[in-house]
Image (cartoon, helix red, strand yellow):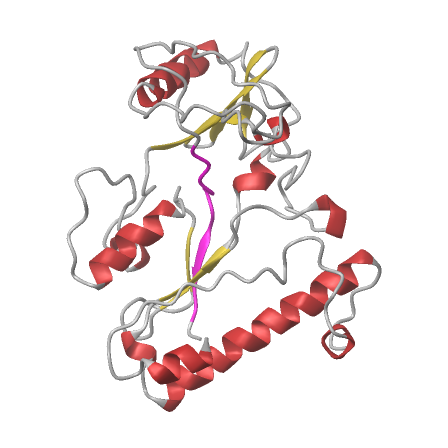
Amino acid sequence: MAEFTENNKDKPFFLYYSPYAIHEPNSESPEYYRQRSTATGKRRALAGNLIAVDDAIGRLLDTLRKHKLQSNTLILLTGDNGGSPGSNSRPDPYRGGKGEGTQYEGWVHTPTIISWPGQIPKAKTYDGLTCTMDFYATAAAVAAKSLPRRCDGKNLLPYLRGEKTGDAHEELYWCNDDPKDAPRRHLKAVRWKQWRLVKYDDGWRLFDLKADPREERDLARKHSDVVSDMRKRYNAWVATLAPVIPMKKGEGEGGGRTPPEKPYPGGGVRPRATRPAAGCPIRVVRL
């Protein structure tokens, strides 16, 4: 990243960095990185890789300072999913994570750090409902570029600057029933305010994440009106999606069979899978 910045310091640039180092299995971190952590057991390997990535980001920041580019550079740092139980990662206070916990908020709820000295205030926390697709809309606003007609992302700058309050999105949706994807990653869910509605084999379950972040108390019967409203919103959204690309014989993790198309309320066929990370608190810092 530092080398890229050096080579492009005199012109506008876009850098996307997605390291595999912190993706499980992560047992290959060099010992000199692990020694800088107090972690033990499985978490020691993960900690070593986190330190390695932190060093790489530090070199990037040093390069930006060297060329006085901090005030002209927006940095967004996040994860694409919650932690993996296999590496003893914890999504506290939520439940779940990558793997068998994909039905829970802990899989899609990830922290985010944003920095743009002089443009957004430091030491500010924004807890509104956001999604990684908002990064695209925010970057477009920074570059003074118009968005395409179909863009679900929202420009986060007004919320980070305090010009707007509340959630960036009234609700967020997930629909991943792609036959090419592993069944354990299939997810149908809605987030609205403190509510999370999730589809299970036995029906829809409703959770109040504010009072019950671990999703242990199903409130679907008690708040059937909320379930009904959120299901209507979800079905209306699903009807706008493009159909899934047909799967060739033998493809996919789920046995290689192409399921028949199934109609959804409002028309249309099986939707193309979408799996955004969402609901993440954003902390603005001065890097």
Q: How many numbered discs?
A: 0
Image quadrant assignment for residue 100: top right
In the image, is residue 181 part of the stretch drawn in magenta?
no
Which is nearer the eye, 175 or 244?
244
Rendered location of residue 192, percent (x, y)? 41, 29
The residue that appears at 64% across and 66% down in the rendered structure is 50
Q: Which residues are magenta?
A: 274-285
Main secondary structure of the magenta stretch: loop
Say if 230 sits above or below 278 in the image. above
Rendered location of residue 55, percent (x, y)? 58, 77
Say if 70 sits above or below 176 in the image. below
The residue that appears at 40% across and 44% down in the rendered structure is 131
Outermost residue to the bottom: 66
In the image, is residue 284 part of the stretch drawn in magenta?
yes
Outermost residue to the right: 41
Where does the C terminus fall, quadrant-wise? bottom left
- Side of 157 relative to 97 (left or right): left
